[in-house]
Amino acid sequence: MSGSARERTATEVVPGVLRLEEPDGPRWICQFVVNAPDAVLIVDAGLPGSAERSVLPALRRLGARDRSLLITHPDTDHCGGTAELVAAIPGLEVIAHEADRDALGDPDRTIERRYRRFAADGVEPDAAALARLRRRLGGAFRVDRTVADGHELRLGATIASVVHLPGHSPGHVGVWLPDARVLIAADAAMGAGIPTMDGRLLYPPQFFSPSVYRATLERIARLRPGVMLCTHEPVLEGAAVDAFLRASRDAVDALEAHVDAALAGGARTLPEICAAVHALHGSLPDGRAADLAMTVAGILEAMVGARCADVTATPAGRAWSAAA
Ligand SMILES: [Zn+2]
């Protein structure tokens, strides 16, 4: 595809903030660039190939500046292009939150921490899916610096604040641009789930703890962003931000109710509970119950903590039941 055709995927959302959109199978993914007079902050590296397709052409137009890359969290579509960007940009500093550092940089470790986390409970990608994940994670890279909530990335006169928005991953971060009231949120809030280009649901909301995820939704609401930039959503502005946060909260409520009902219906193992929740949900793609594993396991853990469910260890993994 020609450069000019690709350039149409780059939009300046507000002055100095670029949104680079590209197709990823049935869905959209985005990377973001904060362009300050003296420095450029890239937020997320996309997939292998994203560097040449979208990020590097955008950077070439901006000219040489100090460049850094903030990785919001360790999923393929956010960190898979990192090694290529590091190779292409001398001195590129790679930044992430401390809590996700272990899951970043070594693709095999990312697979263990992120995508095979529930293997012992009987949910794991098959060999073909693992090979695809491995390809999409790209090459190894080093995280040069870790940051925590409130860290200010100084880009000349522009202040970009790191906001810790855990839930989708323990170290998920966003970038808050207070002057423009823009929040680059990536996957910190997920609405009803990740949509396809034609508006169907591709993935459920994925979070490791409902309470941590809810707190992040509240945090975003308190920031009152005028513009919120999510990786798999159109640009959200004004009332659309509130509606998206409401949809995100409603989705947690619904998933909790489904897990509760699945236990009452006798489901016990993680694959069984995911299958039951998938059936109750009704709007997720066929055959994709395993996409619910992180969310369902997080809800179950919260239920056990609240003494609403019991968990026992079995040779085939953990088994849950409604509290007696
Ligand atoms: Zn994503």
Image: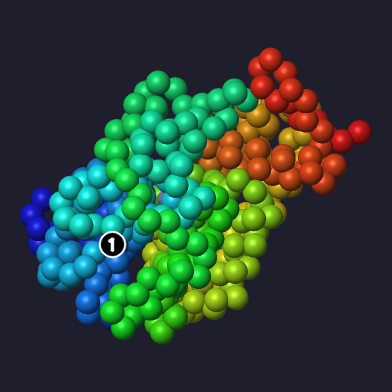
Q: Residue furthest top?
A: 315
The kind of secondary structure element at disc 1 is: strand
Q: Position of residue 3 (x, y in %)?
A: 9, 58
**Residue at 62% in and 25% down:** 121
Residue 41 falls left or right of residue 110: left
Q: In the rendering, at what x and y percent does residue 230 appear?
A: 42, 62
* 101 up-or-down from 277: above or below: below
Quick one: 286 or 188, which is closer to the camera?
Answer: 188
Write down the quadrant of residue 302 in the picture. top right
Please give the name of the residue rendered at 65% of the width and 48% of the height, measured from the top-left corner.
Answer: 209
Which amino acid is tagged 1? Ser
77 relative position to 183: left or right? left
Q: Which residue is mark 1?
A: 68
**Image quadrant of residue 158?**
bottom left
Which residue appears at 41% of the width and 84% of the height?
179
Q: Is residue 135 visible?
A: yes
